[in-house]
Amino acid sequence: MARPFSLAGLLRLRKLQEDQAAAEVSVARARAAEVASRQKYAENSLASLMTPTVDSESMRWTAAARASTSSALGELEALEAEWALRTEDARSRHAAARGHALGLEKLEAKHTASEAGESLRAEQAVLDEIAARAWKIAQGDGRR
């Protein structure tokens, strides 16, 4: 009977940690994309405010809108940098978790191969014994 892999529980834990780290990478990428989209929208809004104005009231409103949009762009750039760092951090944690799981997966593969080899050796020993008995019977040695 094959022995179970003794580190199976730890391997399951490592795979769960890897899955969690992958989910964190996914969330960080989604947030970074959301911030980039908002930044692009703000840039387009600022570009649309570059139209010439006719009166002083329109000019004041345009200046206020430009200032507000520029401020929002600055905040979005800072937020984009923060999410880029978070994404990179999540990627490095995922790579580390993958490395831990990979080492155990290799041990499990070696264990499985070893158990398969043991099973085949045991089966071959039984087949050899059957063949030896059949040969003895064929040679006239009637003992069983």
Image (cartoon, rainbow, N blue to C red):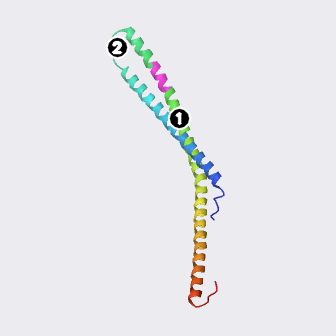
Q: Decide which of 30, 12 is in the foreground and name it.
A: 12
Q: Which quadrant would residue 51 be assigned to in this image?
A: top left
Dominant SS in magenta: helix
Q: Decide which of 21, 111 is in the foreground and name it.
A: 111
Q: Amino acid at mark 1?
A: Trp
Query: Residue at position x 40%, y 23% from top?
Result: 45
Please state, as top left, top right, bottom left or bottom right, where the N terminus lies in the image.
bottom right
Does 124 appear in magenta?
no
Q: In the rendering, at what x and y percent does residue 34 appear?
A: 47, 31
Give the labeled residue for mark 2.
53
Using the image, determine if residue 36 lies above or below residue 141: above
Number of other residues with Cα within 10 Å of mark 1, as a class: few under 14, some 14 to 19, many 20 or more: many
Q: Which quadrant would residue 111 be assigned to in this image?
A: bottom right
Q: In the rendering, at what x and y percent does residue 27 appear?
A: 52, 37
Look at the numbered disc 2 and give the secondary structure of its residue.
Answer: loop
- Asked whether, in this view, residue 127 is left or right of residue 72, the answer is right
Q: Which mark is residue 132?
A: none
Number of other residues with Cα within 10 Å of mark 2, as a class: few under 14, some 14 to 19, many 20 or more: few
Between disc 2 and disc 1, the foreground one is: 1
Using the image, determine if residue 99 lies above or below residue 89: below
Distance between the Cα atoms at labels 2 and 1? 37 Å
Q: Earlier in the sequence, mark 2 or mark 1?
A: 2
Q: Amino acid at mark 2?
A: Thr
The answer to whether residue 135 is visible is yes
In the image, the segment drawn in magenta is 67-74
- Asked whether, in this view, residue 38 is left or right of residue 95, the answer is left
The answer to whether residue 92 is visible is no
Q: In the rendering, at what x and y percent does residue 64 appear?
A: 44, 15
Q: In the rendering, at what x and y percent does residue 144 appear?
A: 64, 83
Query: Residue at position x 63%, y 54% from top?
Result: 8
Q: Which mark is residue 83?
A: 1
Q: Which quadrant would residue 102 be assigned to in this image?
A: bottom right
